[in-house]
Image (cartoon, helix red, strand yellow):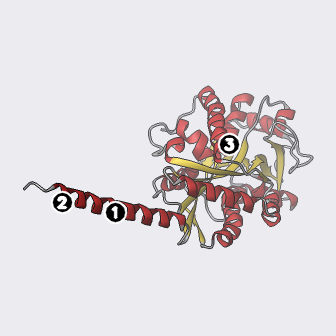
């Protein structure tokens, strides 16, 4: 049945008003963000350095945003499981991810077929949180007093020494893989869910070494229960004064820096991304948060989303070269 011009105009007007109303409701809802608790995914276990950093940030961020920030640990596969979970979440600002460089930088190259997410396509950057060199840790009773002596020990016992990692493809794995390649040694990798489990196994003598973040290791080192043989920054570290770098001990260009950063699912509205960036950067700049990061031997390093994207791209290029040179694949 044909409608009259006036009927068609009335119908178009009603549809237009309805669409405008829905747009206004959507805009109002977005402007009201956040109006319910926010889930912060941490792809590592409780007590790990990402977990401690997340909780240090979550409390003041919750107060500033007026909503609870619920830290949700989803460990496994070197951080890939929790990172994948966050990448599939609804992009509405109510799921944020605090993760480390491994799942964002090295995992896509190591797990080309099975990773299940693309860090640059499925996640949107918010801000870098902080950076820290890794440390090569051995038991206090290890005969090795430095990295070169550890290499000599490994050569005297080919294939007999074990080392811990937080999963294949993690910085703890790749750092040891670089050392194996440069020094011509072979060790056995033992994967764990987090660094607290690694340091426990080192103290128990179950494994003989591990590259890890200093925040988990240094209390045991200070207690005389473990030793640091080297750090993985190219230059001496202000947060770890007096400890020799791997490069200083003859391992050329040996660098493996850990960093933590915050992301959200891709498609999260840009105004929410900007609000989160502004709010989290203010939190990172607080003295009490800086003190908690210093206790973990992390240097605060808040950034813009664009700066974090550049970091991920550049780090991926650098580690792709290392992974390809070592011939590593975990598919």
Question: Which tag, 2 or 3, sits closer to the chain's start?
Answer: 2
Q: Nearer the viewer, mark 1 or mark 3?
A: 1
Q: Nearer the viewer, mark 1 or mark 2?
A: 2
Question: Which tag, 1 or 2, sits closer to the chain's start?
Answer: 2
Marks 1 and 3, how far apart at CA: 41 Å
At which x and y percent is residue 130?
74, 52
Residue 248 is at least partly visible in this image: yes
At which x and y percent is residue 242?
92, 46
Q: Residue 17 — which label?
A: 1
In the image, 84 versus 123, the foreground residue is 123
Marks 1 and 2, how far apart at CA: 15 Å
Residue most extreme to the right: 242
* Residue shown at 41% from the left, 60% from the top: 23
| Crowd around label 3: few <14 · some 14–19 · many ≥20 (10 Å) | some
Is the residue 208 above or below the residue 221 in the image?
A: above
Is the residue 219 above or below the residue 249 in the image?
A: below
At which x and y percent is residue 311?
67, 40
Name the residue beneath numbered marker 3. 307
* Residue shown at 74% from the left, 60% from the top: 282
At which x and y percent is residue 168?
58, 44
User: Which structural element holds mark 1?
Assistant: helix
Q: Residue 193 — which label?
A: none
Marks 2 and 3, how far apart at CA: 54 Å
User: Which structural element holds mark 2?
Assistant: helix
User: Which structural element holds mark 3?
Assistant: helix
* Residue shown at 73% from the left, 29% from the top: 182
Residue most extreme to the front: 6
Is the residue 240 above or below the residue 286 in the image?
A: above
Position of 42 compared to 294: left or right?
Answer: left
Name the residue beneath numbered marker 2. 7
| Crowd around label 2: few <14 · some 14–19 · many ≥20 (10 Å) | few
């Amino acid at each position: 049945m044909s409608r009259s011009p006036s009927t068609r105009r009335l119908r178009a007007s009603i549809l237009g008003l309805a669409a405008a109303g829905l747009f206004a409701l959507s805009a109002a809802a977005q402007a009201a963000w956040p109006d319910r608790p926010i889930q912060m995914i941490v792809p590592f276990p409780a007590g790990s350095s990402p977990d401690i950093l997340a909780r240090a940030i979550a409390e003041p961020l919750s107060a500033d945003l007026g909503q609870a920030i619920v830290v949700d640990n989803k460990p496994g596969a070197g951080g890939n499981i929790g990172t994948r979970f966050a990448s599939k979440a609804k992009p509405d600002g109510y799921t944020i991810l605090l993760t480390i460089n491994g799942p964002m930088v090295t995992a896509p190259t190591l797990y080309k077929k099975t990773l299940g997410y693309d860090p640059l396509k499925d996640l949107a950057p918010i801000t870098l949180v902080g950076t820290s060199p890794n440390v090569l840790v051995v038991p206090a009773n290890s005969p090795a007093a430095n990295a070169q002596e550890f290499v000599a020990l490994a050569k005297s016992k080919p294939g007999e020494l074990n080392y811990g990692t937080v999963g294949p493809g993690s910085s703890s794995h790749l750092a040891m893989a670089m050392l194996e390649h440069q020094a011509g040694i072979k060790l056995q990798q033992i994967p764990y869910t987090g660094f607290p489990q690694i340091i426990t196994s080192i103290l128990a003598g179950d494994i003989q070494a591990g590259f890890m973040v200093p925040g988990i290791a240094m209390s045991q080192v200070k207690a005389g229960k473990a030793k640091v043989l080297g750090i993985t920054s190219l230059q001496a570290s202000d947060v770890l004064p007096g400890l020799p770098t791997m490069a200083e001990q003859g391992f050329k260009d040996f660098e493996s820096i850990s960093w933590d950063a915050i992301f959200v699912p891709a498609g999260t509205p840009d105004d929410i991304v900007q609000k989160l960036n502004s709010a989290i950067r203010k939190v990172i700049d607080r003295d009490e948060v800086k003190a908690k990061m210093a206790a973990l031997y992390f240097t605060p390093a808040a950034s813009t989303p664009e700066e974090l994207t550049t970091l991920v791209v550049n780090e991926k290029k650098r580690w792709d070269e290392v992974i390809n040179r070592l011939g590593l694949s975990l598919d």
